[in-house]
Image (tube, coloured by chain):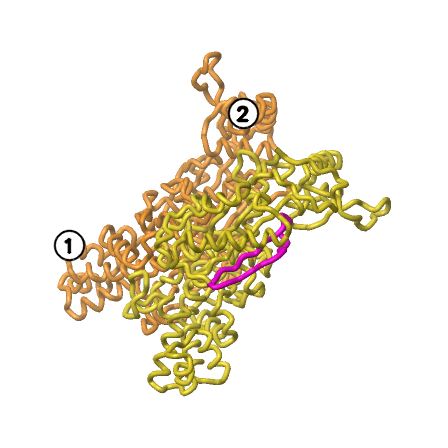
Chain colours: A orange, B yellow
Amino acid sequence: MVQTLSPSNATSTKKSSRLTAPIILNSAEVEIMRALRRQGKISRSEISHITGWSKAKASQEIRSLVDKGYLVEDGEGVSQGGRKPRLLRINNQLGYVAGIDMGATSLDIALADVAGSILQRCSEATDVKLPPETVLGRCTELLLELIRAQGGTPDQMLGIGVGVPGPVDFARGVLVAPPLMPEWENFPIRDFFKKTFTAAFVVVDNDVNIMALGEQRAGDAASIDHFIFVKIGTGIGAGIISNGKIHRGSDGCAGDIGHICVDKEGPLCACGNKGCLEAMSAGPAIASKAIDAARNRISPVLSQILESNGGIIRPEDVNAACREGDQAALDIIRDSGQMIGDVLASLVNFFNPSHIFIGGGIANFGNHLLVAIRRAVLHRSLPLATTHLSIKFSRVGSNVGVMGAISLALDYLFVIEDSPHFII
Amino acid sequence: MVQTLSPSNATSTKKSSRLTAPIILNSAEVEIMRALRRQGKISRSEISHITGWSKAKASQEIRSLVDKGYLVEDGEGVSQGGRKPRLLRINNQLGYVAGIDMGATSLDIALADVAGSILQRCSEATDVKLPPETVLGRCTELLLELIRAQGGTPDQMLGIGVGVPGPVDFARGVLVAPPLMPEWENFPIRDFFKKTFTAAFVVVDNDVNIMALGEQRAGDAASIDHFIFVKIGTGIGAGIISNGKIHRGSDGCAGDIGHICVDKEGPLCACGNKGCLEAMSAGPAIASKAIDAARNRISPVLSQILESNGGIIRPEDVNAACREGDQAALDIIRDSGQMIGDVLASLVNFFNPSHIFIGGGIANFGNHLLVAIRRAVLHRSLPLATTHLSIKFSRVGSNVGVMGAISLALDYLFVIEDSPHFII
């Protein structure tokens, strides 16, 4: 089934069109692919050093991978006294992987090669309240456009990582009781994509989990054992890394912090409870408080926005007003930060992370929000848990979700036969 | 250095007196010891089956362990057609391990053999506000009594697991900023025990972490990936298992849920904040509310206890009054349960465990407490996170701490050279 590429094909742009993911390797081969995925280009002797194998054993396994076309030689390294060593890398011509980051109102999609380098990306507005066929159909169209723009064909797609804004049964790849998108419950997302991308292995996870993975693989968290990634947007959720691994929980819904109770007498939330963190401090709550402030003439700036926007204030308008120095807007943003910080203080006592990364649309609101979050956490958590605690915005920015989704897809590209151990 | 025991020593009671922990093995030998620790007595062919090795390879590694005296033959198994197979087990005559479970006011100590079977145990009251030399000196006396009662000597102690009621820097084995026992900060607990038990490897952990380990090794949680063990006593704390492993957090203080804020205007806590869960609902808070009820003549039963006890009501007196049908006592216990349940509801949303086990002195209060906790969790957590959630009392009972401490000590008894991988 596997197209054999000789080493001389290294610089060819020809794509293998007959691979199907996942690609089964032996454990030694997987170890080499894992080293190359982490290190990029390395020599045979470096592979021998990393794996602890003899040069003969390393050369044999490398030859097998080169013969199968998964590795190629690419340039020369620095001489250690003798001949310059030939460098090896993953054959990025094998096919494509895609990352899809679906928010409640936005869609980010990126196409990458199998070495994980992003080739092209696109973003557009969406609405996950639409039927799954509509939203996933649009994802398929965009993926086809991206792959065609690269001169490829749909059967070259080897992996798709999908982040969705709701609780996911990770083993089955379906949403379970998602509050924002009830029509999606148990919808077979994998099968939907497999109809078009027949060779791809599709992995579905919660949107914040893929952000935590993106921070781990492409951001500042590569070597951090325990951290929390908090997404603040239309909703609020957390991705949790414990002992370097994602903690999905027993039903795949770990990190659902948006529905932690902040005020038992607070406003009704979409989940049916009162005073959930999300209902009190996420994007819609910020907008709603701003509309109140505008109507009550507490803030002339917000009143003006309400009028000129035709009766609507968006969260980003509140941010703009805050930047103009509007006190009411600043208070609204600070209040949100404090409520989020109060909840995070409890979670810091419970989980004792060394880092909290903040991302999502509302995170762009900048330092007023971050300072309020930090202040609340420091005020309520135990000193030992906060001495080394860092709370900061994710530096990966809006790419963090698609980076995590691509990384997740790559985890399942080369696997060991009969084993649950995937490349990390 | 290792005393060699031949297989014929299997039933001897002679103890090796020259071993020092940790005992270094190769990775194959550790795999066999791990299998035997889990399974008790098994045959050579079962070891071959579990490890996936050829019979020749398994026999060779087993022979090495028998020659070193770590394994012994003990009886015969069921015939699979031919001769009855000889069974192997860990040589429980190698030495002793001990588990110490130190609460704020109680001390539980057990002595076990290296196969993990408890030989003898003892309990007494203590006060961790005393200097560490006093409390640990008493622990040493008790350990010496236990080991002598078994006919052993201090140099046969190969491992000591110690649980202490405060945050522990696990790598260094010291308490860090412990609110209940400030004098213990950075006290070298390991070195203290090593003076008397020179051959022992000493492991120090938080008291609730060792309870979670005890539940995993001796209770109902053997195959549970994600659970929380909650101790309710003088304080309140949690032990966290994520992906089958203990989650200690970045500073070793994960699970410190006693200082999560329940009421910003609540009573002052020992930690300096107001309205901590512990200050509102643990043992002392229950007793203090009962004294108020007695003084205000809300409860004749509690008033009578207050008088006959000389102005003191203990938490167990409140429980006794509740069992007699006293409404005020019942309300106090229910209130505690609800506050604990409200906090656990947030943690269930965040962590999505499949089980919560409740232990500690106040857990003996029975169903009124448990029902109140369950009701609060079900009321506030998301449906997906509670559909399969089980909240129950630990069935291991008062042994759970020492069982976990012994298990932790055994984790560090046989280790792989140059490796952080210990027997599990």
Locate residue B83, reporting x and y percent. 85, 44
Where is residue B45? Give x, y as percent.
Answer: 76, 43
| Residue at image location 51% in from the left, 65% down from the top | B359
Q: Please, what is the three-letter code of the amino acid marked with disc 1?
A: Glu
Q: Position of residue B318 (x, y in %)?
A: 44, 78
Give the residue at x 54% y 68%: B392
Dot 2 crowding, Cα within 10 Å, few <14, some 14–19, many 20+:
some
Position of B167 compared to B46: left or right? left
Q: Quadrant of residue A275?
A: bottom left
Which chain letter matches label 1? A
Which label sits in the foreground, 2 or 1? 2
Disc 2 element? helix
Q: How many marks?
A: 2
Q: Which one is in front, B197 or A277?
A: B197
Q: Is residue B366 above or below residue B51?
A: below
Q: What is the span of residues highlighted in magenta in the rendered image?
A: B106-125
Q: Residue placed at 56% from the left, 65% from the top?
A: B397
Q: Nearer the viewer, residue B60 or B119?
A: B119
**Residue matched to label 1:** A324
Residue B124 highlighted magenta (yes or no): yes
Disc 1 secondary structure class: loop
The residue type indicated by label 2 comes to: Ser
- Mark 2 or mark 1, earlier in chain: 2
3D distance between C-alphas at marks 2 and 1: 59 Å
Placement of B94 over or under B240, stated as above or below: above
Q: Residue B4's spot in the image, x, y percent?
A: 69, 35
